[in-house]
Amino acid sequence: MISRREQDRLRREEGRGNGQILILTYTMAAVFLCMAGYLTYFMVTKSQKIINNPYNKRQEVLAKKVRKGKVLSGDGKVLAETRTNRDGKDTRVYPYGKVFCHVVGRDSNSMTGIEREYCYPLLTSHLGPLGRLANTFRGEKSPGDQVVTTLDAGLQEAAYDALGSHRGAVVAMEPSTGKILAMVSKPAYDPNQVEENWEELVNASQEDSKLINRATQGLYPPGSTFKIMTAMEYMMENPETYGDFSYRCRGTDSFSGNRINCYGKERHGKLDLQSAFAKSCNGAFAKIGTKMDLARFRKLNEKFYFNRDLPVDFEYNKSKFSMDEDSDMGEITQTVMGQGKTMITPLENALIASTIANGGEMMSPYLVERLETESGRVVTQYEPKSKGRIVDEWVAAKMNKLMKTVVNQGTGSALASLPVQVAGKTGSAEFDSEGTSHAWFVGYAPADNPKIAVSIVVEGAGTGSQYAVPIAKKMFQKYLAR
């Protein structure tokens, strides 16, 4: 007969054994759930990226059964399509030639642009089972899905033509949604003739490279367009007293031994913040920089995605901001007026202008509106995504007023003749020891109900008012005259 003590011991051991079994059971269940969750995550978010990899042989398998779908503009124009000749050979064709070469990309000699990012959807057919079966019996390929972009073909052509023979880039966005309406980079190449011209394209210098998308990958000093960032920080640090700012410009000034000149050493006279911004006075902004909280200013720039990954699904370079509380006076005075070490992409500058135009709320830039079948049935619809309010509404409203003054009384006066009010900022960004400048303009219209924001850089041209503003004018005229 087992004693009571022994019975208690056995019950305790049995309980421990059952507990261990339960722990093992729950652990296995948790592992299974984690694996199932990761598999779901992989299928939803990762599989398309893996298949989109140009080294993935799955693309070749899909291409044997599916005719790659069209890429369309938002207004229904064909930007890329596959044509099949009598021998059954497929050729990817780009009806607009050079105009969309960087943003739409190419299919041969390493895919780029939308052709690369949406290769899998373009090689996926949502034709019904009976239709696919019928095509198989006939030995024909099923039609791939179509990518409908946010791009406006007419605006893209206007921007391409306006940039002319200059090197540079143009980005246009819809501020309220983040839709990219136009994206132009020059010099450009014809994606229909990539194979014939490949050696010339890959052997070009970086300065003359036609393969670089300057709109998203080109890094430039922002020049006076960066005074938008400086002005916002100054107002946020001094919400009650920024209206009292005063500076007398004599064309040149010294800050702790660091000489700052206005463009052409022009004397602007007595200025408040609004007139300093309108006339783009370097001395006034250098003075602002000497009083600024540098740690706060860095945080503001990083909120606008300097030094950070942009919320986009296409290739780009990060804009760079290096100034911090340890920077010396030379770096401070240069940085706050848009020189120094700061580097920016035209896309980033468009994002800043769009955020101000949208009352301080930033919308993620995006290029694709939807995926649809050849017959127009929607497969996937993409919606605008907000990144939140980056600056308060009152700051955006004040910047709107300052940027309207640039057009009405300052360096952007060539835009004052348009039938709508424009808000903007010009810039002339020196990039070599000889004082050669990139010409910049960023802005939006109509100023109080923005429909379009633009960012324009013309490499090595000179002043923004002379070279970038006329491009902006043609774009506003094209887009808003509808």
Image (cartoon, rainbow, N blue to C red):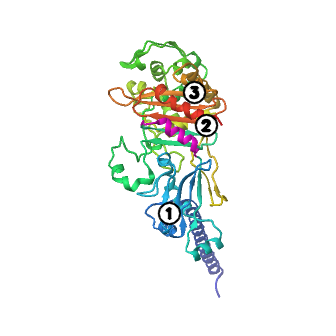
Amino acid tagged 1: Ile
Figure quadrant of residue 476: top right
Magenta part mainly helix, strand or loop?
A: helix
| In the image, farthest residue toward the bottom | 1
Q: Could you tell me how far apart the alpha carbons at marks 2 and 1 are, in whole angstroms? A: 37 Å
Residue 100 lies, in percent from the top left, at 50, 47
Per the rendered image, the range of residues in magenta is 151-166
Q: State the mark number for residue 51.
A: 1
Amino acid bearing label 2: Tyr
- The answer, for residue 299, to whether it is visible in the render is no
Tag 3's secondary structure?
Answer: helix
Q: Residue at x 50, y 67 (%)?
A: 86
Q: Tag 1, which secondary structure?
A: helix
Which is nearer the eye, 311 or 24? 311
Marks 2/3: CA–CA distance = 34 Å
Identify the element where label 2 is drawn.
Answer: helix
The residue positioned 34% from the left and 50% from the top of the image is: 200
Name the amino acid type tagged 3: Met
Q: Residue furthest front?
A: 86
Q: Answer few, some or many: residues within 10 Å of disc 1's Cα (few below 14, many 20 plus, some between 14 and 19).
A: some
Q: Quadrant of the N terminus?
A: bottom right
User: Along the polypeptide, which appears first: circle 2 or circle 3?
Assistant: 3
Number of residues whose C-alpha sits closer than 10 Å to that of mark 3, classed few (under 14), some (14–19) or many (20 or more):
some
Residue 31 in view, yes or no: yes
Disc 3 designates what residue? 236
| Label whose residue precedes the other's in the sequence (1 or 3) | 1
Q: Which residue is mark 2?
A: 479
